Image (cartoon, rainbow, N blue to C red):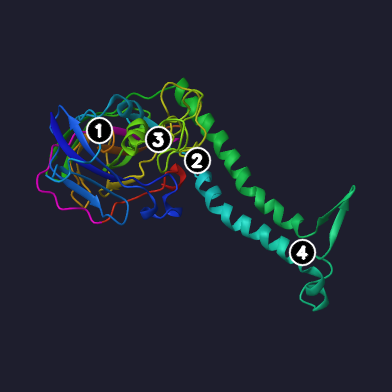
Amino acid sequence: MFRSVQRLRYPPFEHASMDPLGVSMIEVVVESEQKPPPAFSIGHDEDWNVEWRSLMPNEDDLPSLTCEISREPFEFITRTRNGWYIEPDPLHSLARRAIRPAVVIIIFSLLIHSLEPGLVASGLLSESIAGSYRIGPLDYPKLLFFSFPLFIVPIIFRIIANLRDIRRQNRYISSPLDDILTTVEIEGNTLDLLLQQVPVDVITQKARLQVGMIVPEREKMLEALGREEGRQSAPGMSTRLPDRRITAGEELGTGVGESIPLAIEHPRLLLLEPLRVMDWGEWVDLDISSGRYSLPGPRQIWPGSIYSALIAIHWEIVIDAVRDDGTRMKWIKPVLVNDRERLDSIPVMPVRSGRVESN
């Protein structure tokens, strides 16, 4: 039985609005029949961070956690991050950016309405836009007739984008694509990619090598914190939903239903859920549908592929492509990277938004 120490402060879904020091640090001794990877550290103690190292003599009092350690992706990872995925409609991103100014405008309109008598008396506001319209028994401020339509624009954008995404998903289900056949070879921090066969109705555009961390397993997070299911959740996780699976984030209690746009019922998720911790190399243009390309890794040297319940370092290839009907697609393939000895610590954890439209 191998014993090692895992220290983890994983960013929650809305990490931008949370102080890392307000999130509990998880420190456990992991016991496993598989040998742990060489020691590595990403981030620092006063920020989001993860560390996996050997057990020190004075750390026997840390709580123990028994879990599987694997050099290959777990089944749920290969099921949710492998194959073809549809690029969400760009209106999702536009709707997300329009929410804040829309809210500011409607609040500003209500503020002006409350100060109308003084503003009109001082000549700062015209009487033509002051006052209210009476509709039935109620009065409605005139300014709201201008600001409220702007307020609902992001909602309309989101509805239109979801309808387009549903149509694209149904189109893919009725006519799925064959996988891209590839051969990969890793040399140092570079991956040599050989495209052997690409579906005829797809045009590949660019590719890159990326690495990130999978969301920790919910049950093991609660066990490491000494909490029970049904009571206080782990930081950054919601309570478990009682209904069937809709998205990976909802099932794990991490995405709170907002990590991806509206997905239809299908055995495999067709919208790729983003990794909150992720880094990548530069995009490489794919000039032809088949050939050999060299994909650089991230500038920071990351650990090799390793998977456990709390810490999982996952490597994958991403290929941007366009289908003949104009649908933007991504093809994902997990990559196994060997252990890397004597790694320098990565000073800052590259944290991303949990929402796909923000990535």
Q: Position of residue 305 (x, y in %)?
A: 20, 36
Image quadrant occupied by the N terminus: top left
In terms of depth relative to the viewer, which is nearer, 260 or 290? 260
The reply to whether dot 3 and dot 4 touch (C-beta < 8 Å) is: no
Provide the residue designation for mark 1.
65
Q: Position of residue 339 (x, y in %)?
A: 13, 39
Disc 2 secondary structure class: loop
Mark 3 or 4 closer to N-term?
4
Disc 4 secondary structure class: helix
Q: Between marks 2 and 3, how big is the CA–CA gap?
A: 13 Å
Q: Is residue 174 above or below residue 17?
A: above
Provide the residue designation for mark 4.
113
Depth-wise, is mark 3 or mark 4 nearer the camera? 4
Disc 1 secondary structure class: strand
Provide the residue designation for mark 3.
272
The reply to whether dot 1 and dot 4 touch (C-beta < 8 Å) is: no
* Left or right: 131 as drawn, with respect to 354: right
